[in-house]
Image (cartoon, rainbow, N blue to C red):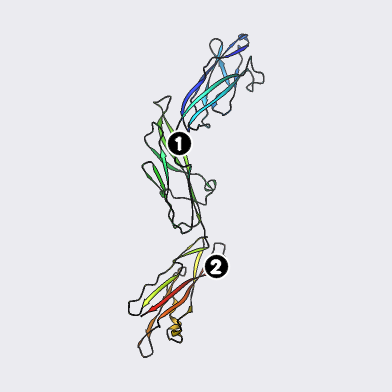
Amino acid sequence: MSLTMLSPPLRDVTYEGLPAHQKRVEIGYAGDVAALTGRVVYVKLVQPDSVYLFDSIVQPGAGQSVLFTLAGNALHTFAAGHATGTLQLFVCVDTPDCATPLGNSPLRLEYDIEVLAGLAFSANSLEQTTNFGAAVPASELAVTLPSGASDWFYTPISTPADALQASVFLVPSWMHRSGNTITFAPPADLVPGVYAQEFQFTTVVPDPVFPSQPQQLVRRLLVRHTVVATGIYVATPASVEITQSLSANPAGLPTPTLVSQVGGRFHRLGVRSDSHPPAAEGHPLLATWLVEGQDANASRPSYEIHYCGLDELASRICLPEGTYRGVQLMRHIAPNGTETDFEIPIAFTVTP
């Protein structure tokens, strides 16, 4: 029995990200046609790229041919451009693996698929890394619509964090759309870690072969922001410097803000006076120029500075001019219980 490919080469047009369209294929046969009566005919498809799928059982058609449908494989999508290849079709009876093919199997059928550009991004992902506490530059992504599309939208995908190599999901509101541009601007006060989220971008286009049938084009985008720890904690400001004129109202006392880079908590340990001008030696206010503050929250720095007061005769006295130095004593307690003591320098300068 001899076989003949009756179908012309397969021609198709699809979009990037979509499978091929289904195609009808007909194979003619000649010879001992009666031998096929009552028997099941199988076609085994061998292809390089899994472009098509079909049920291997076919039915003999009217006359001397078999007719079957190749369906586009939804798991195989294309990049923009042209996809070409050659299918091999083995025809046999009774055994789907075609151990004994009929006649001159395999027959060959070429395919040529024009692939139109789909949703295009200016980058394959949005990823950035910053040190803890550093300013975070905004990242932008330009979205280009395919021909025939009028708009697009994006939504977060519930991808497990470990699959994203992330420790925390980022907040979708850090993404802002303006026209066809996405701006990614995470806040600067994030604790160290990897923040990530996968987004699905979607647009709708008319099918290039069946224009009345709309098709959804989908593309995914990974957005990842990594904050690198530069130590155990950050104090802002890292030190306190105050200048106080004896002829002016009391200056404000800055209170540093503490942020742990590794998790855990802080505990205030008090203050310590380290140095003073020689002229202040023996001064009655020297021992109490720097004392611990009254903040009931012991996780925050708190201190007081006393530079003027009353002597035993109720006369006003003040510290001599010059710079007085001390520290706020703090402790960081990590989640695993590790304790790290640190100091916040305090410089207090008295002027006339």
**10 Å neighbourhood of mark 2: few (<14), some, or many (≥20)?**
few
In depth, the one of 65 and 228 nearer the eye is 228
The residue indicated by pointer 1 is: 218
Q: Is residue 293 visible?
A: no
Determine which of the numbered discs, if any, sits on residue 340 in the image. Answer: 2
Q: Quadrant of residue 36?
A: top right
Please state the horizontal and vertical placement of residue 62, each as a whole percent of the image: 53, 11
Q: Between marks 2 and 1, how big is the CA–CA gap? A: 50 Å
Picture mark count = 2
Q: Position of residue 136 (x, y in %)?
A: 44, 54
Which residue sits at x=46%, y=58%?
Answer: 134
Q: Which secondary structure lies at badge 1?
A: strand
Residue type of the residue flagged with mark 2: Thr
Q: Is residue 345 visible?
A: yes
Say what amino acid the circle numbered 1 marks. Answer: Val
Q: Quadrant of residue 59?
A: top right
Tell me the number on the disc at residue 234. none
- Mark closer to the chain start, 2 or 1: 1
